Amino acid sequence: MKILFYMPHADAAAWLHDFARALPEADLREWQPGDTAPADFAVVWRPPHEMLAGRDDLRAIFNLGAGVDAILALEHERPGTLPRNAQLIRLEDTGMGPQMAEYVTHAVLRYLRRFDEYQALQNERRWHVLDPHQRETFTVGVLGLGVLGAQVAQAVAAFGMPVRGYSRGARQIDGITTFAGAAQFDAFLDGVKVLVNLLPHTPDTRDVLNARTFSKLARGAYLINVARGGHLVEADLLDALASGQLAAATLDVFREEPLPDDHPFWQAPRITITPHMSALTLREESVEQVARKIEALMRGETVGGVVSLERGY
């Protein structure tokens, strides 16, 4: 089998070395501009149009991440980028779940115990004890109950806070109150104290973190966005913080990355910024998963993680 690899700004040699160990029978190569030689599979992250367009020989394209919005956006902008007969397959967890659960749990507990406010007091050299939030009413709402969202919801619930989850289709998760579909969206939001976004980025979910959504939350609520920057209407967040409807936000993803030096978020004291690191792609785990799926496809078997181009995930 022939496998093409493309991942900009990565140590391609290390990835190819690990794939060679996992699939010793494979013919592996890093894609370079002008390479139109045959290939059976492509393993990619943010590939250019010319790498994939016209490659009707590809059986599957493996996206080195859980989110496929970038590659679908390329197909939308330049129809025909994705070969007609190739399945688009995303990573399923590969070690991202525990990382995401750690990140979100840390952020939730930071707000629960008001450590963000204590940091501000320290900066002012003020010694002052703040009244604690009540754990029993500190409701956390998780938008998106896929593999990552379900793990996050259960990790937060383990600390005794009420946790709700929202998804497009009905889900049942032990210890989590679940809501599904547009008809239950407002009921899910009602009174939530911490809103955590883990939705896939699709045309239906773009700009979902907006003024209307914020208005349904408990006053003085908190936002944690670890999905995509395109979910957030940035001006609405700044307005909600200024009005007190939101108390603070933790953002790991942005519409433009890296975040520009002159972006107003840098100057907003109630916004915590991290550089899209909440759940990093782990090479060994990712290689193992992709390799096993390639072997299964070669045997004519079905695999998980196949993306519906209609749904966008």
Image (cartoon, rainbow, N blue to C red):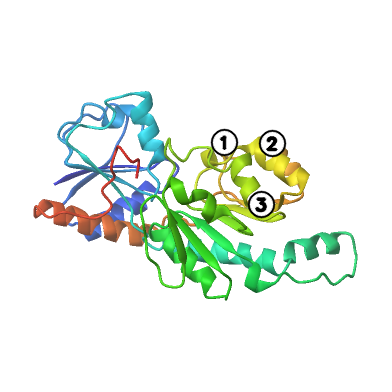
Please name the residue shown 47% across and 60% down the image. 165
Residue 172's spot in the image, x, y percent? 37, 65
Crowding at dot 1, Cα within 10 Å, few <14 / some 14-19 / many 20+, comes out as few
Residue ID for mark 2? 263
Mark 2 falls on what kind of element? Answer: loop
State the residue in front, 244 or 16. Answer: 244
Q: Answer whether labels 1 and 2 touch (C-beta < 8 Å).
A: yes
Question: What amino acid does circle 3 point to?
Answer: Ala
Q: Is residue 56 above or below residue 205?
A: above
Please name the residue shown 54% across and 59% down the image. 141
Question: What amino acid does circle 2 point to?
Answer: His
Crowding at dot 3, Cα within 10 Å, few <14 / some 14-19 / many 20+, comes out as many
Residue 260 visible? The answer is no
State the residue in front, 277 or 202. Answer: 202
Residue 119's spot in the image, x, y percent? 78, 63
Q: Answer whether labels 3 and 2 touch (C-beta < 8 Å).
A: no
Residue ID for mark 3? 249
Relative to residue 177, is residue 168 drawn left or right? left
Q: CA distance from mark 3 to mark 2?
A: 15 Å
Residue 126's spot in the image, x, y percent? 90, 65
Q: CA distance from mark 3 to mark 1?
A: 17 Å
Mark 1 falls on what kind of element? Answer: loop
Relative to residue 288, is residue 85 drawn left or right? left
Q: CA distance from mark 1 to mark 2?
A: 10 Å
Q: Quadrant location of residue 132?
A: bottom right
Q: Tag on residue 256? A: 1
Please name the residue shown 90% across and 64% down the image. 125
Q: Is residue 1 above or below residue 93?
A: above
